[in-house]
Amino acid sequence: MGLIEHLEARLGALTGGWKRDGFQVGAFEGAFGAKWFATVGLSRHPLHSRASGRHLWLELIVGSYPSGPVNGLPHLLGQVADELLVSGQALLRGDVLGPRGPFAPGSAMEALYAAIPVYFDDEFAAADVDDGNRAAIVWLTPISAGEAAYVASHGWNAFEDELIKHDPDLLDLGRAELPLR
């Protein structure tokens, strides 16, 4: 199964896309009633892991309900992928990008958290790509500035414990910030 088929099997039908320098951003609809955006081809570029020193191959996803402010998500996803290509550094589980300002008027979400795609089956977390490598699927989950600060001060394990405890709807860009201490 190729990358597009792997993504469509979980995210829903490919409905459009945008060409970027070195990869594409695809739009998918269906899974969990959300609109999803994914990089396609980012994994052609090996990225350096600061933890292991090895090369990693990644594809990124981000999603939100279509009733929410999803229009800026493809650009944001493309911008993050561009930054990874320029730096040569891989995103690792628990990394936070931002805060970058609210993703939409009235939204508390203004940073991205690199997570495993826990809304999906375990097999979705990695995909075979054209050159014989396995690419990790990294879910860029929108979080608030306060949640980003919590990750910085308490670590990603503690933050993920809070996510489990509070079970927020991570596809709702209008969700309330977690009550973290």
Image (tube, helix red, strand yellow):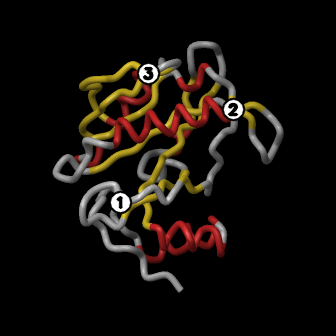
- Residue farthest left in this picture: 67
Q: Distance between the residues labelled 2 and 3?
A: 17 Å
Residue 128 drawn at (x, y percent): 57, 23
Q: Name the residue under label 3.
A: 20
Badge 3: residue crowd in 10 Å (few <14, some 14–19, many ≥20): some
Q: Is residue 82 left or right of residue 64?
A: right
Q: Distance between the residues labelled 2 and 1?
A: 27 Å
- Residue farthest right in this picture: 53
**Which is more toward the observer, 171 or 117?**
171
The secondary element bearing badge 3 is classed as: strand
Is 114 placed above or below 61 here?
below
Residue 10 drawn at (x, y percent): 37, 36
Label 2 or label 3, whichever comes before in sequence order: 3
- Check disc 2 and give the amino acid type: Gly
Q: In which quarter of the image is residue 104?
A: bottom left
- Residue at 61% from the left image edge and 54% from the top image edge: 95
**Which is more toward the observer, 167 or 81?**
81
Residue 133 drawn at (x, y percent): 66, 21
The secondary element bearing badge 1 is classed as: loop
Q: Name the residue under label 2.
A: 88
Label 2 or label 1, whichever comes before in sequence order: 2
Mark drawn on residue 102: 1
- Check disc 1 and give the amino acid type: Pro
- Check disc 3 and give the amino acid type: Arg
